[in-house]
């Protein structure tokens, strides 16, 4: 019997070592943080991907008696493997699901690590649109150069096993999860994951503490409604897609919510009054947001995007 155990342990070790060799090691620091009874996360570095071996986004995981749920997979298989080693340091349970906040390079290039161990990949609607787009191909081609050797010819874009287009709940090992689907908020499709017993929200890139978000092609109406719903959850922690956990989760949601609400108020009034964007923009009072990081870089474009989308909403009425 002992021999069998030793043999099994040896095989497991050999498998792990082989897997390790598949991924060129990273040298970035990736301390593990615990938040709540079941929840853990790592925090990407500020700055650009190429300065940080691709480690600029966050990822988390939730340990249950029936297996582990991972949230986002980081920006290379090597980083995904570092996360996998952290998981192994906490539990010997397998990773059974990976919930992907959205299909952007910095959140999905680690997916193959978990796919290869048999985890179900759950992604918001929009993932396939991204995977089929020239942008996805161009980005990975570029990353195979700029993030070599960590992103290389063995790095592959992993398709989701399940695509989500409405909110849903599931339970694993006695832990209740709530998935909120936001439509295209920050990307082609965005989701958040709320871990009920811990009151922890993994928010992806839709909540930015203390800075102006990039609105992009967002459906700001849907985004705003979701933030309003999340605000009532009395969170103990909020893990954003980038940067440290929010020091004040309620304030973090409120900050993004107030900004989006103001954009929609000002630009909605301009659309209703058939005004031109430029004059509506320059006459608006931005003083509440002017001091925030990224205001200069993002605000005018955000406002213009909201103006255009609210014109479209008005036409559809
Ligand atoms: Zn991101």
Image (cartoon, rainbow, N blue to C red):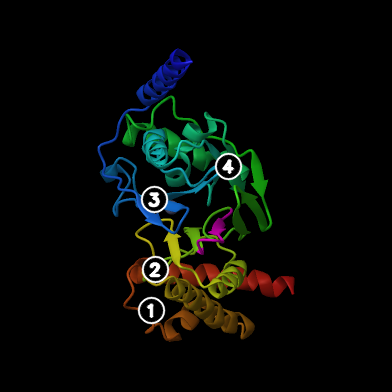
Query: Which residues fall within the magenta stretch?
Result: 189-199
Secondary structure category for the residue under label 2: loop
Say which residue label 4 marks: 66
Q: Is residue 275 visible?
A: no
Is the CB of mark 4 within 8 Å of ligand 1? no
Q: Residue 10: x, y in percent? A: 40, 17
Q: Earlier in the sequence, mark 2 or mark 1?
A: 2
Work out whether residue 276 or residue 170 is closer to the camera in this orientation and state it: 170
Q: CA distance from mark 2 to mark 1?
A: 13 Å
Say which residue label 3 marks: 57
Which residue is rendered at x = 56% and y = 75% of the image? 232
Q: Earlier in the sequence, mark 4 or mark 3?
A: 3
Q: Which label sits in the foreground, 4 or 2?
A: 4
Q: CA distance from mark 2 to mark 3?
A: 15 Å
Quarter of image, res 194? bottom right
Q: CA distance from mark 4 to mark 1?
A: 45 Å
Q: Earlier in the sequence, mark 2 or mark 3?
A: 3
Say which residue label 2 marks: 209
Counting labels gives 4
Q: Is residue 161 visible?
A: yes
Secondary structure category for the residue under label 1: loop
Most extreme residue toward the right is 317
Which residue is rendered at x = 58% and y = 40% of the image? 121
Is the CB of mark 3 within 8 Å of ligand 1? yes
Q: Earlier in the sequence, mark 4 or mark 2?
A: 4
Q: CA distance from mark 4 to mark 2?
A: 33 Å
Is 194 contained in the magenta span? yes
Q: Which label sits in the foreground, 4 or 1?
A: 4
Q: Is residue 317 left or right of residue 89?
A: right
Q: CA distance from mark 3 to mark 1?
A: 25 Å
Q: Residue 148: x, y in percent? A: 32, 31
């Amino acid at each position: 019997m002992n021999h069998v155990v030793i043999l099994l342990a040896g095989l497991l070790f050999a498998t792990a070592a082989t897997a390790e060799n598949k991924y060129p090691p990273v040298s970035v620091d990736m301390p593990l943080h615990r938040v709540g009874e079941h929840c853990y996360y790592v925090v990407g570095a500020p700055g650009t991907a190429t300065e940080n071996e691709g480690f600029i986004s966050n990822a988390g995981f939730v340990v249950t008696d029936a297996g582990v749920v991972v949230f986002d997979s980081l920006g290379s298989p090597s980083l995904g493997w570092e996360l996998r080693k952290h998981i192994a340091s906490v539990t010997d349970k397998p990773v059974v699901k990976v919930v992907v906040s959205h299909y952007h390079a910095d959140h999905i290039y680690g997916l193959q690590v978990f796919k290869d161990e048999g985890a179900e990949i759950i992604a918001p609607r929009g993932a396939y649109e991204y995977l089929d787009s020239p942008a996805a191909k161009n980005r990975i081609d570029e990353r195979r150069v700029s993030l070599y050797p960590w992103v290389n010819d063995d790095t592959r874009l992993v398709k989701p096993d399940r695509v989500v287009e409405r909110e849903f709940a599931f339970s694993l090992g006695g832990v209740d999860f709530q998935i909120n689907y936001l439509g295209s908020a920050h990307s082609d499709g965005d989701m958040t994951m709320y871990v009920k017993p811990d009151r922890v929200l993994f928010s992806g890139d839709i909540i930015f503490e203390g800075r102006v978000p990039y609105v992009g092609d967002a459906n700001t109406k849907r985004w705003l409604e979701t933030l309003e719903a999340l605000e009532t959850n009395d969170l103990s922690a909020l893990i954003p897609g980038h940067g440290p956990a929010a020091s004040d989760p309620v304030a973090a949601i409120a900050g993004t919510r107030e900004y989006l609400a103001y954009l929609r108020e000002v630009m909605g009034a301009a659309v209703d009054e058939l005004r031109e964007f430029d004059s509506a923009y320059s006459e608006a009072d931005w003083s509440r947001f002017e001091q925030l990081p990224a205001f200069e870089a993002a605000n005018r474009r955000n406002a213009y995007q909201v103006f255009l989308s609210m014109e479209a909403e008005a036409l559809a009425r």
